[in-house]
Image (cartoon, helix red, strand yellow):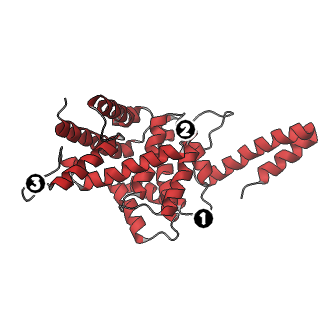
Amino acid sequence: MYVFGKILGIFFGFLFGGPFGALFGLFLGHQFDKARRLSQAGFRASSAFSGGPSQAERQAEFFKAGFAVMGHVAKAKGQVTKQEIQLASTMMDRMRLHGEQRKAAQDAFREGKSPDFPLESVLDAVRISSAGRHDLLQFFLELQISAAFADGELHPAERSMLHTIAQGLGFSSQQLEQRLRMQEAAFRFQQGGGFGGAGGQQSHGGWHQANQRDHLADAYKVLGVEESADSKEVKKAYRKLMNEHHPDKLMAKGLPPEMMEVAKEKAQEIQSAYDLIKKEKGFK
């Protein structure tokens, strides 16, 4: 636990400024301790008193934080199993990481499993380096949700950890639960052939009617709208999601190039869900 800075801050603050000085010293000491934690974890500490990091540095920090927090989520269930490690490897495969990039992701994942991993400080750093860009922070949160859902289910400990992460990034519990419902539907939608085009692939005479209904229901959930939504509501939700998840826009705002493939997959998933609804509902 990092308290050395706080102790010194309070002591010298009180010595030179009395009770008000002690409070100011506590604040400065807290910033010092937080910077130490980030530094020891290998993250850059942002500060109003120093120059900000470059775009490349912010991208590198975002990349490392993404896999480190992923490791922390995996550890939430207790001992990290071979399955969790395989899920992380699957995510690296999706990003087409090789050589030094893959090693950096593996090292970050291992750091996240550490019992004293400074989650709060790392999330602070992500939020600050993202400069309040909602879509970047949302991508970071969805990355963690996607990794947690990679095995098709969400452990209660993982859900609790995701709530902590969401809060640290500035999202409400309601916003997280909405994203969890959308991701759960997205997982089923992918399994049902959502990326094969609207309606999925035909097999043995076509989908059963019940499967068609379930697939369409998941498409609505992927877009975050009710099945009763009219064409105007569906189009509005689709455009909003595509604007938030457009790979080129995310890249321009600081998304690491290594994560572009995940962004492209998400955009394709949204497009496939929208195409299916358009086909089934018959609107343009």
Instruction: Say whether residue 62 is visible.
Output: no
Q: Which numbered disc flags the more N-terminal residue, 3 or 1?
A: 1
Q: Which numbered disc flags the more N-terminal residue, 3 or 2?
A: 2
Choose mark 3 or mark 1, whichever is in front: 3
Between the residue at mark 2 and the residue at mark 1, the CA separation in whole angstroms equals 25 Å
Residue nearest the viewer, comparing 53 with 170? 170
Residue nearest the viewer, comparing 237 with 91? 237
Question: On the image, numbered disc 2 is attached to which residue?
Answer: 129
Please state if 210 lies on the left or on the right of 78 as rendered. left
Where is 26 relative to 84, above or below? above
Where is 59 relative to 162, above or below? above
Kind of residue indicated by mark 1: Pro
Locate residue 61, reporting x and y percent: 51, 45
Instruction: Say whether residue 12 is visible.
Output: yes
Question: On the image, numbered disc 1 is attached to which residue?
Answer: 115
Contact (Cβ within 8 Å) of mark 3 with mark 2:
no
Between the residue at mark 3 and the residue at mark 1, the CA separation in whole angstroms equals 50 Å
Please state if 110 lies on the left or on the right of 222 as rendered. right
Secondary structure found at label 1: loop
Residue nearest the viewer, comparing 159 with 2? 159
Secondary structure found at label 2: helix
Label 3: how many residues lie within 10 Å, few (<14), some (14-19) or many (20+)?
Answer: few
Kind of residue indicated by mark 3: Gly
Q: Which numbered disc flags the more N-terminal residue, 2 or 1?
A: 1
Question: On the image, numbered disc 3 is attached to which residue?
Answer: 206
Label 2: how many residues lie within 10 Å, few (<14), some (14-19) or many (20+)?
Answer: many
